Image: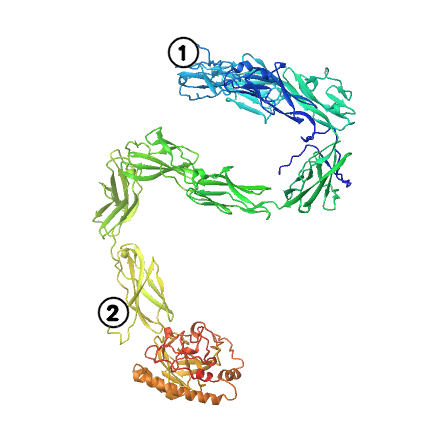
Amino acid sequence: MQLKIMPKKKCLSAGRVPLILFLCQMISALEVPLDLVQPPTITQQSPKDYIIDPRENIVIQCEAKGKPPPSFSWTRNGTHFDIDKDPLVTMKPGSGTLIINIMSEGKAETYEGIYQCTARNERGAAISNNIVVRPSRSPLWTKEKLEPITLPNGHPLVLPCRPPIGLPPAIIFWMDNSFQRLPQSERVSQGLNGDLYFSNVLPEDTREDYICYARFNHTQTIQQKQPISLKVISAKSSRERPPTFLTPEGNASHKEELRGNVLSLECIAEGLPTPLIYWIKEDGTLPANRTFYRNFQKTLQIIQVSEADSGNYQCIAKNALGAIHHTISVTVKAAPYWIMAPRNLVLSPGEDGTLICRANGNPKPRISWLTNGVPIEIAPDDPSRRIDGDTIIFTNVQERSSAVYQCNASNEYGYLLENAFVNVLAELPRILTSANTLYQVIANRPAFLDCAFFGSPLPTIEWFKGAKGSALHEDIYVVHENGTLEIPVAQKDNTGTYTCVARNKLGMAKNEVHLEIKDPTRIIKQPEYAVVQRGSTVSFECKVKHDHTLIATVSWLKDNGELPNDERFTVNKDHLVVTDATDSDGGTYTCVANTTLDAVSASAVLSVVDVPNPPFDLELTNQLEKSVQLSWTPGDDNNSPITKFIIEYEDAMHEAGLWHHQAEVSGTQTTAQLKLSPYVNYSFRVMAENSIGRSLPSEASEQYQTKAAEPDKNPTAVEGLGSEPDNLVITWKPLNGFESNGPDLQYKVSWRQKDGDDEWTSVVVANVSKYIVSGTPTFVPYLIKVQALNVVGFAPEPAVVMGHSGEDLPMVAPGNVRVSVVNSTLAEVHWDPVPLKSIRGHLQGYRIYYWKAQSSSQRNRRHIEKKILTFQGSKTHGMLPGLEPFSHYTLNVRVVNGKGEGPASPDRAFSTPEGVPSAPSSLKIVNPTLDSLTLEWDPPSHPNGILTEYTLKYQPINSTHELGPLIDLKIPANKTHWTVKNLNFSTRYKFYFYAQTSVGPGSQITEEAITTVDEGKMAMASRQVDIATQGWFIGLMCAVALLILILLIVCFIRRNKGGKYPVKEKEDAHADPEIQPMKEDDGTFGEYSDAEDHKPLKKGSRTPSDRTVKKEDSDDSLVDYGEGVNGQFNEDGSFIGQYSGKKEKEPAEGNESSEAPSPVNAMNSFV
């Protein structure tokens, strides 16, 4: 609800005085309810200056209210207007509005005059303003013959308009025969009087249709003057002159304007060159917010002019030859305006009151009073009133004192007329606001609770809050004179019921209203500024939080208007999505969240950017032999400023269709001075670049061919190398067509020996990039140069480069070759360098060939594997890595040049000392028994010396992967098998096995195996290897396995009658199975780990059926025992056979048969 706030208000003091408003009778603008007796009040009337359209009926308005309803009468030109005698005039029923029907007959001019309406009832009479009725007029131009105007170039000119005088005045403008407005500028402009002023004429001003048009808006008609013909004669030179004023004339003038109007001051000057106009106010400054310059600063306008704007204004016309000024003295007059207009008075019998009528103007207006439309001097006398200038004082009024008083303030520029009644009533208080009105207000905003009231005498107002009616004492409340209670900053605790009480001496009235405070609507996620490329999708987010009892609607605006009606714009709950963004989509997008009580908004700017549009209008100017100026017009930057322009050229003569980079200039330039090469047929194109990317190329410019000239550069990459021992091949990178600078491009090739006294030998060649000089000495330095030339002349003197004639193989081998053995795998070789002359080429380095001496079994082979190491440059020593220990080697050394290798040095033999051996080639475990396992192995493939012994280490592994004590055995070097005894039955063991030389131990090989309980079973498993593929054998094995299973179950049941099971026994025997980690220096082992070579058998890990373990695959495998133990391991490799009775069968690998269940598993299934 929109609440009206009165300008005056009273606040409760801090002393907690009861919130009671005593309204002064003098400040009484209360509306009298229409059901009470009251004098007439004019509510609507036509304007004082009423211009009518003569083609339509005349309607003169006069509406009034009162009780009883008023009757209406009219005067015309100061006398009674009897509407009953004129059939064309009727009065609108229930009002005083006159309708004069002139459309059927009659003329508007007949009813021109001054009209005044009177509304009267038993309590008084109210009158309207004097309404001056005039029909609008749009007269034609008088016929006139206009002679053509002929002027020399540069002269001033004024084309007169002089429109006919119409009502209201016409709007003037100049156009041609095609109804196109004539262009105006500092040189040509229209004055306030409608004339067209030329400061100086130019040949382009010549035309035959200078037409002045007058538009009469009231009748919507346009009248035109006869066309004026102007011909401007071109003169050789127009003499320049200082400014002079065309209007106003002289050095000073006077201007008078009325207060509140627009002050327009004009100065138009002629001169050559065209003068410019400047404005100042003498002894003052121009008001900043009210001053505007029009008509190319020839017109100064000040809006809402006041007496303070009076003074002297100076316009200054200035050009290069001088300046003049004109002073306009401005006087601001004022028609009357109100300082305090009289207001209606409602008084009770016996009360006092005043009517005040104060106005101002220039000159000072005269105040006169009327009562019921009659000058108060001749009106019936009323003893309760007394006139004191602009005030009427009432004392002890009675009902007969009721009347309508008119105050008239007038001076020579106009008048003001205001009606104010005095209504004497005795009325109980009444509250006009509807009962139980609900006000809903947003928290932290003002709340206004209405209590419109009436009574006579004027009631006092008191507000209460709550059911108990406690009076409001807090100073946070404000009560307005119209009874409205204001809570400046409403809070949640202000919610409740409020009671307004009106009292006067005749009685009291009260009314309850209700106030609810709502949470404000907030945008918790605002849309954010976005920059997107054309064709992209952009999303604006707008999340709103509002009071749950209100309904919020979210709408989107673009540039404060509706969103385009385009399916590319999609609005959902929290988002606005724009797909395929175009340039027109750029702008400000506003999210507006509305409830019935408040509205909030948030905006974000969308910039749609793209690569620039291509430049256009390429033009070549200042065309010189070696330069040209290129200019262009930039294309649209598509909202991303152009940072640079890239200029490319095409050489249509040499490389048609290929574009090359020419230059780059900043994005603010639109011209470039380009350097050109001779003998090129140029075309140019320009591309623009911004932060998004590069535009498409512009259209190609016109072609421009430069003249031929001698080459300004020589070939590059000149080299001299021989391909044979007796030649010199001279090569170069030829010039391209663009670099040739002219036709018939050739090359002058020159050479001579560097260390000789020979003259230069030269040859001229064309269309090649190399020349071969034959019959040269081997590897001799030459000086070489290659010079370009064409039909115009030679290029500058070329640079001299050095080359060499062809190389030949070296003639001498390195001498004094020496070998020093560093260790068992590394040797160092030294040699003496060969003489430089014997190299016969560029020294590339030295190359060592070395090979291992063959054993007697290898000597029958034809091929000897030789290894090669090359040492760059002039080095005379090098290292031979990667040698095999305990081996015999032979080597030789050769020098290398660009042609190849020289002869080999004499062979040198050397031997490497012993090293540590490699791991044994294989390790397999055979013949497992209850307490023994037999290991068989093959010696290391690389013993790297004389084996001294083998070392075997082993330790048991329990079901939790913990390792038992480590046992160390030394085995003679001549052994290839060994039986380990005194082992525990049905126990897994891990074995570590490696060989040793006198140098130390070699790499180890590991394996795991399980002892068993029956040698018959092992024998059967051994035979299985050979006959496992026989069907009868598979059946037999199944029967034997079942029998063995039954026997084992019986055996283990007896063994475990004490309640213990194998794992429990092991736990008792090994209370702390952890072992300290192995140290490299003493060979001790630590706790079992899954890392690298010490991983226990994982599910699915198998070994071949012959129980052989190769070195390269032994790290992650365990030796299978019997029929296999895969079923006894989890996926993580943990041993669980002693805890589970689950029977699993895995498919056999190789020639193995199906696995039999573990006897431990079988046992546990019966426990």
Above or below residue 460? Residue 376 is above
Regarding residue 914, the answer to whether it shows in the image is no
**Residue 307, picture quadrant:** top right
Determine whether label 1 and label 2 are within 8 Å by CB.
no
Amino acid type assigned to the residue bearing label 1 in the image: Pro
Regarding residue 1102, the answer to whether it shows in the image is yes
- Checking the image for residue 863, the label placed there is 2
With 159 as the anchor, is 778 left or right in this view?
A: left
Q: State how many labels appear.
A: 2
**Residue 96, picture quadrant:** top right
**Residue 207, picture quadrant:** top left
Using a 10 Å C-alpha cutoff, classify the residue at mark 1 as few (fewer than 14 neighbours), some (14 to 19) or many (20 or more): few
- Label 1, secondary structure: give it: loop
Using a 10 Å C-alpha cutoff, classify the residue at mark 2 as few (fewer than 14 neighbours), some (14 to 19) or many (20 or more): few
Q: Position of residue 355 (x, y in %)?
A: 72, 24
- Residues 163 and 114: in front is 114
Mark-to-mark CA distance, 1 and 2: 119 Å
Give the quarter of the figure containing the N terminus: top right
- Label 2, secondary structure: give it: loop
**Coloration mode:** rainbow
With 188 as the anchor, is 754 left or right in this view?
A: left
Amino acid type assigned to the residue bearing label 2 in the image: His
Mark 1 or 2, which is nearer the eye? 1
Q: Position of residue 1150 (x, y in %)?
A: 33, 77
Above or below residue 370? Residue 772 is below
Q: Position of residue 1008 (x, y in %)?
A: 41, 79
Going from the N terminus, do you reach mark 1 or mark 2 first? 1
- Checking the image for residue 148, the label placed there is 1
With 629 as the anchor, is 191 left or right in this view?
A: right
